[in-house]
Amino acid sequence: MSWIEGQIFQDEVVAVDGQSYRDCRFSNTTLTYAAGIIPTFADCQFENVSLEFGDAACNTIAFLTGLHQGGLSRSVELIFDSIRMVANDEDSSNADTDL
């Protein structure tokens, strides 16, 4: 997987499966993910960006929605809590390395 570096994506739909982005700017864009190879983003800027899920990724969202509505809301919330914890840990470690 090669890096896409320093590009500006504006007013467009960007399919992100299998891509790696570094120092890119996404403005007024929709990022689409269809559960292919997980994309990576490093030092990118995001402004007014929406997300769309297709194919198997869309099925996963539908599955989680069904679980949440079907009585397993706590289990689904735990998944999101773990995502938040990883994101917070990454923010903390980045802050430590920036000093």
Image (cartoon, helix red, strand yellow):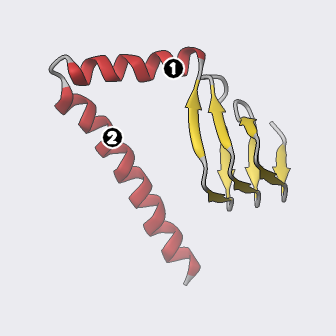
Q: Secondary structure at mark 1?
A: helix
Relative to 41, does residue 31 appear above or below in the rendering?
above
Q: Identify the residue shown where x is 71% and y is 53%.
A: 26
Q: Identify the residue shown where x is 83% and y is 48%.
A: 4
Amino acid type of the residue that numbered disc 1 sits on in the rendered structure: Cys
Relative to 82, does residue 48 appear above or below in the rendering?
below
Q: Residue 9: image x %, image y %?
A: 79, 50
Give the class, few, some or many, for how many residues have Cα within 10 Å of label 1's Cα (few <14, many ≥20).
some
Give the class, few, some or many, for how many residues have Cα within 10 Å of label 2's Cα (few <14, many ≥20).
few
Marking on residue 35: none
Q: Residue 46: image x %, image y %?
A: 63, 57
Q: Identify the residue shown where x is 65% and y is 39%.
A: 31
Between 39 and 50, the one nearer to me in the picture:
50
Q: CA distance from mark 2 to mark 1?
A: 17 Å
Q: Which residue is mark 2?
A: 80
Task: Tell which tag, 2 or 1, sits nearer the viewer.
Answer: 1
Q: Secondary structure at mark 2?
A: helix
Q: Are marks 2 and 1 in contact (CB under 8 Å)?
A: no
Q: Is residue 35 left or right of residue 28?
A: left
Q: Which residue is mark 1?
A: 58
Q: Identify the residue shown where x is 47% and y is 15%.
A: 59
Amino acid type of the residue that numbered disc 2 sits on in the rendered structure: Phe
Q: Quadrant of residue 12?
A: top right
Q: Residue 47: image x %, image y %?
A: 63, 59
Marks 2 and 1, the one that precedes in the sequence: 1
Q: Is residue 51 left or right of residue 66?
A: right
